Image (cartoon, helix red, strand yellow):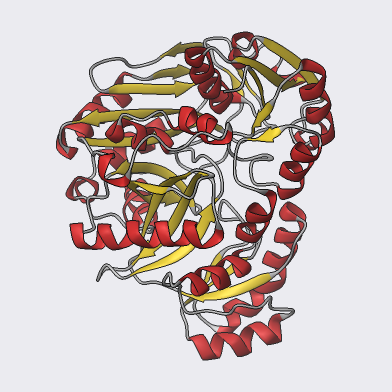
Amino acid sequence: MFSKIIIANRGEIALRVIRTCQKLGIQTVAVYSEADADSLFVRQADEAFCIGKPPVNQSYLNADEIIRVAKESGAEAVHPGYGLLSENATFAKKCIEEGLTFIGPSASIIASMGSKIEARKTMKEAGVPIIEGVDVPLENEEEAKVAAEKIGYPLMLKASAGGGGIGMQLIHSPEELGKAFEGNKKRAESFFGDGAMFLEKYIQEPHHIEVQILADSHGHVIPLWERECSIQRRNQKVVEEAPSPFISEETREKMLDAAVKAAQHIGYTNAGTIEFLVDKEQNFYFLEMNTRLQVEHPVTEEITGLDLVEEQLKVAAGEKLSLTREEVKRKGHAIEVRIYAEDPKTFFPSPGKITSFQLPEGEGIRNECAIEEGSQVTPFYDPMIGKLIAWGETRKEACERLKQALEEYVIEGIKTNIPMLIRTVSHEQFLTGYTTTQFVNEYYLPELTSAK
């Protein structure tokens, strides 16, 4: 096992990794921008180094500076967290070239799964169901319209290198496609340095369900059940739960099998997630693979009793998985909500100073948060400031605990999405367990408008 690692990330995920390392007796090195100098994760790490100014391209995306600090501090491995450089194949490759262990899959696998077009081709080869669409980059609007006629409307216009909903748009007609293509292409070029676009058939009443997997370097792959992540705003997840209340046991086993098949086909190692779209008849289709730890990993930990960061570290150190698929038991139900510093009516970020702060407590309640009273939420980073997880023996119990905890959550000085979350987890449609990716548009926004 490693004696010291560097965490190439910030905020609650940095603090999360530090916690597991403290349990295992591993020293931690934090890197931070000038804006994060007084942050909790900086104080909790054994060592901390400032790597630049607040903008991410001058600090947290500065791969060379992070690697320099890693070598200077004597770190043996790099944990990338999620976001930022976590799925950057060039960074992963540089780590290895500089004698550092990258806590994740190989650079080649990150690159192959980072392109949604290449990932579609690979999964098709593996025998995993994919959505009808195109498997080549569309060069211009005319090519897109020809492809769209073959697929049929409605469809999804997507950026091949995209993430977080950037460059993605639901298209109903050739006119909409014409208006959307160039704008989304430019947006993808700006955010990802890659403007390649493609099209997929739109799945009606889609559920977003993903399978967490672990894979070691000895050829073993195990699925850690699934998570339902259908409630989203602007194509970004807001509520996640495990297990999914929608799929049957038969569908569940087929999805787990498909996820294992996908990971084995590409020779995957470490923690990863195979994401699927599932239609109302429970047909499922590969959506993408995230080659890192997910924001929503705590719900999997809550129903399995595993520490996924610990498992990541062990795999990266060359150890075999300690469990088989049959030994991974599922207990109870867990739901996570993401706490954002944003206006709950517009979803616009709400930076500022937190003047009062108190986390909810109680049986089955878990908080993943790296802020405190007096913390400054800056406009430089993603507005997610924490996660609240509720576990219960049943989904009903988890829902009740989550709602109570949200009502007890205190954050003052900034706007947050907590009112939106309370409204969501109290909603009759959510309580039935049947929520699609259109939940926010179909239920929350119309009710918000009617309540004005």
Residue 412 shows in the view? yes
Residue occupying image coordinates x 33% and y 43%: 324
Q: Is 34 rendered above or below residue 259?
A: above
Q: Quadrant of the N terminus?
A: top right
Placement of 406 over or under 300, stated as above or below = above
Q: From the viewer's perspective, is residue 326 above or below residue 19?
A: below
* Nearer the observer, 426 or 364: 364
Picture coordinates of residue 135, whole percent (x, y): 60, 77
Q: Is residue 274 left or right of residue 147?
A: left
Q: Residue at x 75, y 61 (%)?
A: 194
Q: Position of residue 199 (x, y in %)?
A: 57, 75
Q: Residue at x 55, y 43 (%)?
A: 292
In the image, 379 versus 165, the foreground residue is 165
Q: Quick one: quadrant of the C terminus? A: top left
Q: Position of residue 61 (x, y in %)?
A: 76, 37
Position in image of residue 215 (x %, y %): 47, 46
- Tell me which residue sits at (73%, 80%) in the image: 140
Q: Is residue 101 left or right of residue 444?
A: right
Which quadrant of the figure has residue 361?
Answer: top left
